[in-house]
């Protein structure tokens, strides 16, 4: 069996942990130091694709559509978002950790077909929160895959996104009929309640990590009706 090769490590801002990037042949892995198991594996990406498909379904043929992807990861969410909109749309991807962007510009980029090279893509290296607090209706779809879901694992600061304050801020930067789609490792009834209180019409979908098999993940779909 081909051994794992470590590609690098990256400090998580404002946290004590590190991300560990590894490769074995054409398989890539991202782990969080001190946590058993993987955060991401290049062979498991179906739920990330569904996140983009559902989140962008309403703007598939809309010229000038604007999409924000929170979290680059291995590029699957971004890649599918680009496939889900037309050639006149724009997609901004926000990634907190520079090393993740660098790896996607290099060997890791092959996994999702190098979506950072698409001319419709704009990369923002920094906290996605900065792009969510302008108060101006900017995005037709916001796709968040920045952590384990409503309960942050790698970044406790991500909890703001799922709290009432964050949901209100996101509501303000969504255009009318805009969609907020959130990836989660599992269901969260209280989070659904918070979304509804913030004014969203909410639907959840359970999706397999791989097509037809693997772990069950939850996609929160929250639509701004006004």
Image (cartoon, grey):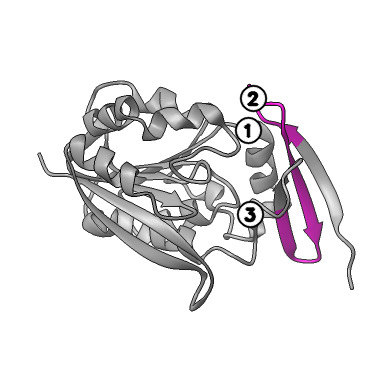
Furthest residue toward bottom: 212
Point out the stretch of residues depicted in magenta: 10-29
Residue drawn at x 21%, y 53% as measured from the top left: 62
Depth check, front residue: 209 or 77: 209
The numbered mark, 2 or 1, whose residue comes first in the sequence reads 2
- The secondary structure type at the circle numbered 2 is loop
Per the picture, the main secondary structure of the magenta-coloured stretch is strand
- The secondary structure type at the circle numbered 3 is strand
Q: Is residue 14 shown above or below 205? A: above
Please give the residue where the numbered disc 1 appears in the rendered image.
97
Residue drawn at x 63%, y 39% as measured from the top left: 101
Q: What number is the disc on residue 13?
A: 2
The numbered mark, 1 or 3, whose residue comes first in the sequence reads 3
Depth check, front residue: 206 or 89: 206
Please give the residue where the numbered disc 3 appears in the rendered image.
40
How far apart marks 2 and 1 lie (CA) works out to 8 Å
Indicate which label's residue lies in the foreground, 2 or 1.
2
Q: Is residue 86 visible?
A: no
* 196 horizontally vs 16: left or right: left
Q: Quadrant of the C terminus?
A: top left
């Amino acid at each position: 069996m081909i051994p794992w090769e470590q590609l690098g490590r990256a400090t998580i801002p404002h946290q004590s942990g590190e991300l560990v990037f590894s490769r074995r042949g054409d398989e890539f892995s991202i782990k969080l130091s001190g946590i058993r198991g993987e955060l991401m594996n290049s062979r498991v990406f179906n739920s990330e694709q569904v996140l983009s498909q559902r989140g962008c379904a309403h703007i598939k043929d809309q010229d000038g559509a604007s999409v924000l992807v929170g979290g680059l990861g291995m590029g699957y969410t971004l890649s599918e978002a680009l496939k889900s909109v037309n050639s006149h749309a724009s997609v901004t991807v926000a990634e907190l950790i520079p090393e993740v962007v660098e790896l996607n510009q290099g060997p890791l980029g092959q996994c999702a077909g190098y979506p950072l090279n698409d001319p419709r893509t704009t990369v923002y290296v920094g906290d996605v929160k900065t792009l969510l607090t302008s108060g101006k209706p900017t995005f037709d779809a916001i796709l968040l895959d920045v952590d384990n879901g409503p309960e942050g694992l790698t970044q406790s600061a991500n909890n703001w996104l799922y709290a009432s304050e964050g949901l209100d801020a996101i509501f303000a930067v969504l255009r009318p009929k805009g969609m907020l789609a959130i990836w989660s490792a599992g269901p969260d009834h209280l989070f659904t309640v918070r979304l509804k209180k913030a004014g969203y019409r909410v639907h959840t979908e359970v999706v397999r990590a791989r097509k037809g098999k693997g772990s069950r993940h939850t996609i929160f779909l929250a639509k701004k009706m006004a």
